[in-house]
């Protein structure tokens, strides 16, 4: 399971030039962009529009050029009075479903801005109901997208919205009120607004306004009071409104602290909102701190962070203790904490800096029983000294067993390196002594001291603090014993040498500590630079690949270079079954990998899901969908360890790059296939149209000649009459085929226009049956139409063609003595029409394919036709806003025929007196 980490922190307090440049660029973009002000309320009727118009009057009096783009007054007299005194922008008329609707005119607003550009104040547009959905066919589906375009053009916008229209709270409020609002606004737009003004009203006053008819008309008010405007709902909505606004203000405060002079680290913690910071150290006890902090956060309802400081002063921490800290971080993440691994020279300073940057007012530390060290303050005392403005909470930790203390430094590979450093320290001191003893009469004592200080620097760079401290102590002892009179004795002939020894020791220790610290920081920075360079190289290579195999090769190379780990890339096939790509070196458990892909969650080593697996399975999450799984098998030396947070972050970044590359390759292939298909369809339609037009004239002539033969005198003989009739029938079938080809070409070209009217379905079915009399013959037809069928809004001629095609299809594949059944009934907001036969049924697995062009039930059959009838039916039904599908009729486990189902929207038919009932779109606040 991945552990999210914050940006790496360093000891360098100088401003980051990249961040400064980014801030300058953001400020420049903000100056060119318009300002958004949102009047935010808990529900309809709190006075958002009224407050916006009142503020607009004040702005208009100050000379700000403004215009009302669109305001919904809902018939409220006081709101209409405010609108009357302000300039209005003409609305745009849009035809939709035989109605004319009035919408906001975006182009007119941009033109208004152009006429007032260059003034002292930017133009202002008032646009009510930010969550409104525009009429289909508009430039943008949503009004908030219109607002985005206005802001990008440098136009200020004022708008209104309710809390239930926020995307992140939509489902929560739906669960509270029992009413789901489908028009939403993304939280990013709300959070980036320059100003949010809360328009609030107590629930009792709001209910009084509702009862007085100041929110809705009486009929709507009565329904709203029962459903939405219940006092409990209004209290909950009011709390969510205030909380969401407070969250936004808190984010603004955090941003200001980061951008202020000196950054957040230069500011004291402001206790505007309590939050916890749990500090985890290496070794045992970290999980105790995490659990205590989690309980405290749960009891108080506070957010909390957990950090493990990877400080250079802890370079002696062995791998086992480090793994315990990483497990504690993973536990904290599972319990809902934000985790991070900042780095720095001193633990206390890093913790304080992190707490100030995130404005965390309470620190939770572990306290282990035992005697304090005489040589310095404990971490808790240091934190209390550095953070007088924060609360420091101490959690008692269990006492470490003596065996644990003895084995702490016996991690594999750590002891030998440490003792090599101390041996090297002793060897360096001996070498300097042997080299300078013969030159004692030549070299001044100060030069000999410099040589020992130089040894301290060299050992600190190579082996760290401990060996450097040993060199400092041995250097002072050797200098006294061999070079200060009396020689070969620790006695001192001059008291001033004691000052020399003290200064030499202090300088050596300070130099050793600073050198080791700088070396650790340099190593950390170098490691990060190497990782960033590797990611950059990988992303550059992935940007040019065109094959999945190339992506697998690049991913395997990166894993081996960065982690010395084996890896495998698994990509799903057409049936969503993972397949290992060439170049895989890891041993993959396919069951674990498939689970990871199906669930979209991390699994395998180091996680809580199937941890016994040798590989860590990372799902490749692309913007659109999962694209596969990356399996990573660590090297043998680290099989028992967890990945560090930095390594997990790097793995997650690598997985994201691979997923995006796989998705890019997929869409390249889709685009190529679509281009080929489009060109093929266009060529085929052109050929069909040309051939069909060229065939219609000779076929019509052939039918006319066959009819003429039957009228000649003397009459034709019987054989000759049969031949003439056969010619006529064959020509008629060819004409039907040509008409189908022309209809299909016309439907796909988009040139077909529906002439819809409100029709009774009975008349359309009757016309279709009459037209099919010649082919139906004596075949039994059963029609069952529900008595409550409404009028349907359809093109009678085209829909009759649909029924004719379905009946012809049933006749072709059904024995002559079998019946055809036609039925219709109302199902909710739809009308369902069925045509059943008693034939062999549809081929298994091809229920959807038979509606394609030139598709037939059986590829090899003597039944006439080219497979266009059902394709034409689907095109006509979809043009009516419906859908058509096929299925087999089953009885006692066997197929007894085919059922073709047409589903059409019910619509709202006209009234009996002939007037048209215009379905009024509900107010966006009317829930």
Image (tube, rainbow, N blue to C red):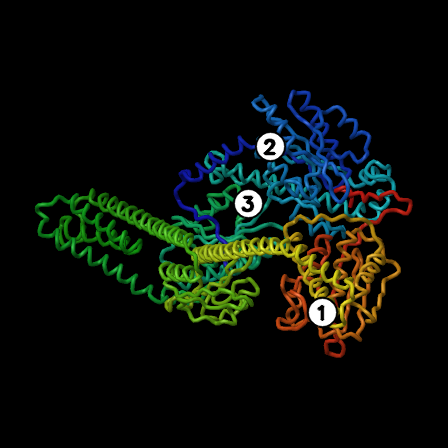
* N-term mark: 3 or 1: 3
Relative to 155, does residue 785 appear above or below in the rendering?
below
Quadrant in the picture for residue 84: top right
Tag 1's secondary structure? helix
Residue holding disc 1: 723
Which numbered marker is on residue 231?
A: none
Is residue 447 toward the left or the right of residue 765 in the image? left
Q: Position of residue 127 (x, y in %)?
A: 68, 34
Q: Is residue 313 above or below residue 577?
A: above
Alpha-carbon span between mark 3 and mark 1? 101 Å
Residue beneath disc 3 = 361
In front of the other: 592 or 461:
592
Q: Mark 2 sits on what residue?
A: 35
Give the residue displayed 64% in from the left and 28% down from the top: 124
Front-most of 322 and 555?
A: 555
Residue 293 in sight here: no
């Amino acid at each position: 399971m991945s552990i999210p980490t914050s940006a790496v922190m360093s000891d360098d307090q100088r401003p980051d030039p990249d961040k400064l440049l980014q801030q300058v660029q953001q400020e420049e973009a903000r100056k060119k962009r318009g300002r958004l002000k949102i009047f935010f309320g808990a529900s309809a009727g709190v006075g958002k529009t009224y407050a916006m118009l009142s503020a607009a009057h004040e702005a208009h009096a100050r000379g700000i050029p403004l215009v009302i783009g669109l305001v919904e007054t809902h018939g409220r007299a006081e709101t209409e009075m405010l609108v009357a005194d302000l300039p209005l922008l003409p609305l745009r008329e849009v035809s939709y479903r035989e109605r004319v609707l009035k919408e906001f005119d975006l182009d007119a607003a941009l033109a208004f801005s152009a006429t007032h550009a260059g003034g002292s104040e930017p133009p202002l547009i008032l646009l009510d109901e930010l969550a409104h959905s525009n009429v289909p066919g508009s430039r943008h589906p949503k009004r908030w997208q219109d607002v985005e375009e206005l802001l990008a053009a440098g136009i200020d916008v004022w708008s209104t919205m309710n809390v239930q229209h926020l995307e992140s709270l939509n489902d929560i409020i739906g669960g509270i009120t029992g009413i789901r609002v489908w028009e939403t606004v993304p939280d990013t737009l709300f959070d980036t607004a320059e100003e949010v003004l809360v328009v609030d009203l107590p629930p009792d006053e709001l209910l009084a306004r509702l009862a007085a008819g100041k929110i809705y008309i009486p009929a709507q008010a009565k329904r709203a009071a029962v459903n939405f405007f219940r006092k409990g709902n209004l209290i909950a909505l009011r709390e969510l409104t205030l909380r969401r606004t407070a969250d936004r203000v808190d984010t603004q405060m955090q941003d200001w602290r980061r951008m202020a002079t000196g950054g957040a680290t230069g500011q004291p913690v402001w206790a505007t909102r309590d939050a916890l910071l749990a500090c985890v150290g290496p070794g045992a006890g970290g999980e105790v701190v995490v659990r205590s902090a989690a309980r405290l956060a749960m009891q108080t309802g506070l957010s909390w962070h957990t950090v493990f400081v990877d400080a250079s002063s802890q370079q002696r921490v062995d791998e086992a203790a480090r793994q315990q800290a990483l497990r504690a971080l993973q536990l904290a993440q599972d319990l809902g904490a934000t985790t991070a691994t900042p780095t720095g020279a001193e633990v206390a300073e890093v913790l304080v800096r992190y707490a100030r940057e995130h404005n965390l007012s309470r620190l939770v530390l572990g306290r282990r029983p035992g005697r304090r060290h005489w040589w310095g303050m404990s971490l808790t005392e240091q934190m209390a000294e550095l953070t007088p403005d924060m609360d420091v909470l101490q959690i008692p930790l269990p006492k470490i067993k003596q065996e644990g203390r003895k084995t702490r430094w016996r991690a594999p590979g750590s002891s030998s390196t440490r003792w090599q450093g101390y041996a090297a320290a002793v060897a360096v001191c001996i070498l300097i002594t042997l080299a300078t003893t013969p030159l004692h009469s030549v070299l001044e004592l100060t030069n000999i001291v410099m040589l020992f200080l130089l040894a301290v620097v060299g050992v600190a760079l190579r082996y760290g603090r401990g060996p450097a401290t040993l060199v400092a102590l041995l250097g002072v002892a050797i200098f006294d014993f061999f070079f200060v009179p009396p020689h070969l004795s620790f006695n001192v002939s001059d008291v001033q040498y004691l000052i020399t020894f003290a200064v030499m020791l202090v300088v050596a220790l300070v130099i050793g500590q600073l050198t080791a610290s700088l070396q650790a920081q340099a190593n950390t920075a170098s490691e990060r630079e190497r990782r960033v360079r590797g990611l950059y190289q990988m992303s550059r290579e992935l940007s040019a690949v065109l094959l999945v195999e190339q992506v697998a090769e690049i991913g395997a190379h990166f894993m081996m270079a960065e982690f010395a780990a084996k890896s495998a890339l698994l990509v799903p096939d057409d049936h969503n079954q993972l397949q290992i790509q060439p170049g895989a070196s890891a041993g993959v458990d396919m069951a674990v990998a498939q689970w990871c892909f199906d669930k979209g969650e991390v699994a395998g080593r180091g996680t809580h899901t199937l941890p016994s697996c040798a590989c860590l399975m990372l799902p490749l999450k692309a913007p659109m969908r999962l694209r596969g799984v990356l399996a990573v098998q660590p090297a043998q030396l680290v099989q028992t360890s967890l990945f560090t947070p930095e390594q997990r972050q790097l793995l997650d970044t690598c997985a994201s790059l691979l997923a995006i590359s796989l998705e890019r390759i997929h869409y390249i292939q889709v685009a190529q296939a679509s281009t080929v298909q489009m060109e093929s369809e266009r060529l085929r339609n052109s050929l069909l149209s040309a051939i069909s037009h060229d065939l219609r004239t000779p076929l019509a002539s052939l039918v006319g000649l066959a009819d003429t033969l039957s009228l000649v005198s003397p009459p034709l003989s019987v054989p000759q009459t049969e031949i003439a009739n056969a010619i006529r029938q064959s020509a008629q079938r060819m004409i039907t085929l040509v008409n189908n080809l022309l209809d299909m070409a016309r439907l796909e070209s988009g040139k077909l226009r529906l002439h819809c009217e409100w029709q009774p379905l009975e008349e359309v079915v009757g016309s279709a049956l009459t037209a099919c009399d010649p082919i139906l013959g004596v075949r039994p037809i059963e029609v069952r139409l529900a008595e409550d069928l409404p009028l349907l809004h359809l093109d009678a001629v085209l829909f009759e063609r649909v029924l004719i095609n379905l009946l012809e299809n049933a006749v072709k594949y059904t024995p002559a003595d079998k019946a055809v059944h036609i039925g219709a009934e109302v199902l909710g907001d739809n009308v369902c029409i069925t045509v059943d036969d008693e034939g062999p049924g549809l081929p298994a697995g091809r229920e959807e394919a038979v509606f394609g062009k030139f598709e037939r039930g059986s590829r090899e059959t003597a039944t006439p036709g080219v497979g266009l009838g059902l394709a034409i039916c689907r095109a006509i039904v979809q043009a009516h806003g419906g859908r058509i599908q096929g299925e087999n009729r089953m009885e006692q486990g066997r197929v007894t025929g085919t059922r073709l189902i047409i589903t059409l929207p019910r619509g709202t038919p006209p009234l009996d007196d002939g007037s048209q009932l215009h379905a009024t779109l509900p107010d966006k606040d009317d829930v």
